[in-house]
Amino acid sequence: MGGNSSGRLALRPRPNEIGDTASDGEERPRLGSNPSALAQTQAAKAETAQKPEQPHARESKSETTAASGTSKPASRRKPVFLGVGALALMGLTYFAYEYITVGRFLVSTDDAYVGAYMAIISPKIPAIVAEVPVVDNQQVKEGQTLVRLDDGDYRLALEQAQSKLATQLAAIKTFDAQIKAAEASGEQARAQLDSAKANVVKTVADFKRTDALTAKDYATKASLDATIAARDSAYAQVKANEAAIQSADANVALLHAQRDQAEKVAKELQVAVDQAARDLSFTVIRAPFDGVIGNRGVQVGDYVTPGKRLAAVVPLDKVFVDANFKETQLPEIVPGQTATVRVDALNGESLKGTVEGVSPASGSQFSLLPPENATGNFTKIVQRVPVRITIPAATAHNKLRPGLSVVVSVDTRTTPKDAGPDQAALR
């Protein structure tokens, strides 16, 4: 047994005597035959394990990975691009249609502003402010009290003027009474004249009878002298009465002249009374029309003089728009056309208006220093002409404020059929 087992063990080959095959296909040297070759083989394997991967191998792997990762999103982008292109084409088509049907008939400008004929409140007399019953941004009605001035001095002046007028009117009544008395004196003188004339007739008759009797010695010389004296006295009395009548008539005429003068003085005093009453009325400053108070600059106790700016009343229901169109745009604009006003302060809200008229000159001609193009170098600049746009009161009320900037578009399709020859010439 022991001999057989030892013989079988002796027949098995030892591992180090058999040529092993490595996993990478290389034949391993036998350890027993060449120990140095085995050491070289192990050193070569260690170098191979420590050697880094080549760059081109890594790039090929990354490209493969990237290609496999982006192939699916690239296929999804194509419909997105097609959708964006379709939307752009639809938008371009819409805007082209809008321009052809509407846009080419509109004349627009953004050089436009809201305006209004506001009233600047100022006093006409110097006085101290007694009361200011209004505040800024308050709605007021026509005739409402805005400022009340101290009226003490002006009330006294009115009373003084009225007293002078009353005195003069009393003087006129005195003249009326004197005229009546003078006229009565004239009537009395005329009556006395008639009596004197009658006496003349009687005395002349007495003289004739006495003279005849004296010639026949039936009357004495003394009787004749008496009748002569009576006759002459009667003639003198007639003349005296005639002079009294002339004096009475002259006195009446004088009194009438004095009365006329007194009446003229009374008229002057009446003017003074009216002036004093007018000055007194100026102590209460009222609103000239319905509107809103703005830019109030007066307080109680201020001493104000004529022309001082106290406040402003803005009629918000009577605002308008002045659109400064270029001169090259004027041929298409005619009064009566419909205008669309887009207000920046209302987030672009559109309001409808009507072209009221075109200014008779460009804005530069109404400036403080109009341009003089006849001297020096000349550069042509397109001028702008104001065009007035009216806004209905119901539309503009509490929406538009003077000074706001707007964008105006005039629709030339709404040109009135009865446009005048001057308007047709512009077109």
Image (spheres, rainbow, N blue to C red):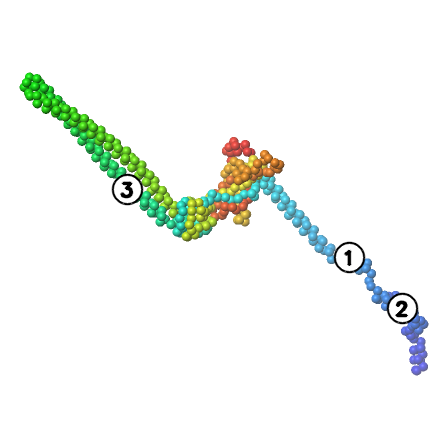
> Closer to us: mark 2 or mark 3?
3
Residue type beneath disc 2: Thr
| Depicted 164 relative to depicted 129: above or below | above
Disc 1 element: helix
Using the image, tell me which numbered label, if any, was put on residue 424. none
| Residue 99, quarter of the rendered image | top right
Is residue 189 left or right of 133 when viewed as pictured? left
* Residue closest to the eye, 64 or 155: 155
- The residue lying at 60 percent from left, 40 percent from top is 100
Name the spot of residue 180 as percent of width and height, x first.
Answer: 22, 35
- The residue lying at 51 percent from left, 44 percent from top is 114
Q: Which residue is mark 3?
A: 167
Using the image, tell me which numbered label, if any, was put on residue 63. 1
Q: Residue furthest left?
A: 218
Name the spot of residue 98 as percent of width and height, x first.
Answer: 59, 42
Q: Quadrant of the C terminus?
A: top right
Name the spot of residue 355 as percent of width and height, x first.
Answer: 51, 39
Alpha carbon separation for disc pair 3 and 1: 123 Å
Q: Alpha-carbon neighbours of circle 1 within 10 Å: few (<14), some, or many (≥20)? A: few
Mark closer to the chain start, 2 or 3: 2
- The residue lying at 31 percent from left, 39 percent from top is 266
Mark closer to the chain start, 2 or 1: 2
Alpha carbon separation for disc pair 2 and 3: 153 Å
Is residue 253 left or right of 341 when viewed as pictured? left
Mark closer to the chain start, 3 or 1: 1
* Residue closest to the eye, 426 or 25: 426
Q: Which residue is mark 2?
A: 41
Alpha carbon separation for disc pair 2 and 1: 36 Å
